[in-house]
Image: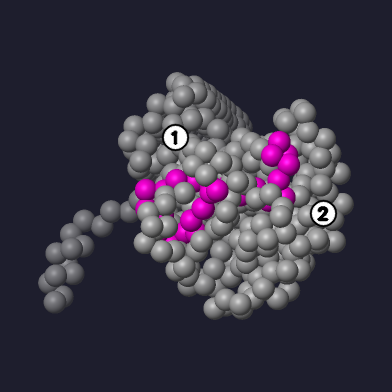
Amino acid sequence: MSKTIPRSGVRTQRVAIAIMAAGKGTRLKSKHPKVLHEVGGKPILSHVIETASKLVPASDIFVIIGHEAELVRAAVGDSGVQFVVQGEQRGTGHALMVAKESLAPYDQVIVLSGDAPLITSETIDKLSAFHASQKAAMTLLSADLDDPTGYGRVIRKGRKSADVRAIVEEKATNAQQKKIREINSGFYAFSVPTLYKHIGSLKTDNAHREYYLTDMAAVLGNAKQRVVAMKTPSSAEVLGSNKRAEIVEVDARMRLAKCLKLMDEGVTIFYPQTCVIDSDVEVGADTVIEPFVQLRGKTKVGADCRIRSYSVINNTEIGDEVVVLPGCVMDDSRIARKATIGPYSRLRPGSDIGEGAHLGNFVETKKIKLGKGSKANHLTYLGDTEIGDGVNVGAGTITCNYDGVHKHKTVIEDGVFVGSDSTLVAPVRIGKGAYIAAASCITEDVPADSLALGRARQTVKEGWVNAKKSKK
């Protein structure tokens, strides 16, 4: 069990983090759980968990799940967090009631929203420290919004006071209160013993008949317990994802921030607003990324590369000094240094492209190894194939790897020259230095340094066309 948030140094409280992730998200009009919709290339909830994990061990993070609970558990279970099931979703206050047994051993609990992925670990750390320093029962994170419409307003006891008199929901505000720009973000820190001493006083006298955590401010205030607010200078941190438009806005903010971070690290990204770069992507210094590039999943791009426009690269490792020409699509592949790919190449999972190799126009690969300096520059399909160093694969070549039931392997050894429009019917091995004549259909192994021809001899019938026409 964590005794404190690690970076605080001076605090000795036992701190837990509870993440609200039980809601359905009806405004999304989706059959999928709201927290599993993606921003920045992974589920919203994954971002919140990742941020929380920078502060406390995963064993001290409790994700409160309800709607489609098992889907949520399966999606983020590898993170090592704990789960609390809120079988009947009766509001945010009810969520913490359900979590009482899990949270009771702690001194402080920080409550995060599972649909607000822009919150930073630095802000959470400050919230926890502020709560402890104020000796408060409840600390809420607030923010100033240019347009606070729809949010609960924070009413402080004085302009410079940390103490909160009330949280007034939008529908209950008067004309003066509507002018207040400071809103309640839905992020909190609580003294656990005080929380559970008073949480039973929450009422369900509202339109949805639910227990609202915001009402704890009034409950604790009436019990003469201290309720305070800490304002974040970055209001974007607290943005939630209740509607599709909000998800898209959060995604855009996250991706632009990723581009700016990469540029700070020495990457050139032209027109970053057009690029889609996921949170976990890594790019080396002096690499240039052109407009309309997508780098997805856990893709790693080396230094001094150039990724040209309209390429979509997913979970692929790219070495240094690689050139990816326009319109390439890659999945779960590996490209060694100084290789050139494209334009319009398609690398399917398991493609391993060697140093200085070339794949060109409309070449498709799947589960292959292409050796150092080898080339397949035009209109070719290579599947389940091992290709040695210095091989030239001519335009229109096909490795026939599937017999309708099983996949078979083609082996092309070093220095082979495969003529254009050849068909290699697997399983087959082409020996070192061999030549395959253009338009051959190869069904048997070819020894090293041999020439293989697999085509019918050309026949020319002079006058055939005129004879055909005369019959008509």
Magenta stretch: includes residue 143? yes
Residue at (47% x, 59% y) in the render: 151
Relative to 192, is 287 above or below?
Answer: above
71 or 130: nearer the viewer: 130
Q: How far apart are marks 1 and 2 (CA)?
A: 43 Å
Q: In which quarter of the image is residue 174?
A: bottom left
Q: Which residue is drawn at 63% across and 58% down?
A: 217
Question: Is residue 264 among the parts visible in the rendering?
Answer: yes
Q: Which of marks 1 and 2 is in front?
A: 2
Instruction: Using the image as rendered, state which of residue 462 and residue 133 is in the foreground.
Output: 133
Mark 1 vs 2: CB contact within 8 A: no
Residue type, label 2: Pro
Q: Residue at x 79, y 60 (%)?
A: 196
The image shows residue 242 at horizontal and vertical percentages of 49, 62
Q: What stretch is highlighted in magenta?
A: 132-157
Q: Which mark is residue 259?
A: 1
SS class, disc 2: helix
Quadrant occupied by the C terminus: bottom left
The x, y position of residue 106, in whole percent, is: 83, 49
Quarter of the figure with the N terminus: top right
* Residue under label 2: 193
Estimate how packed mark 1 is, as few (under 14), some (14 to 19) or many (20 or more) residues with alpha carbons within 10 Å.
many
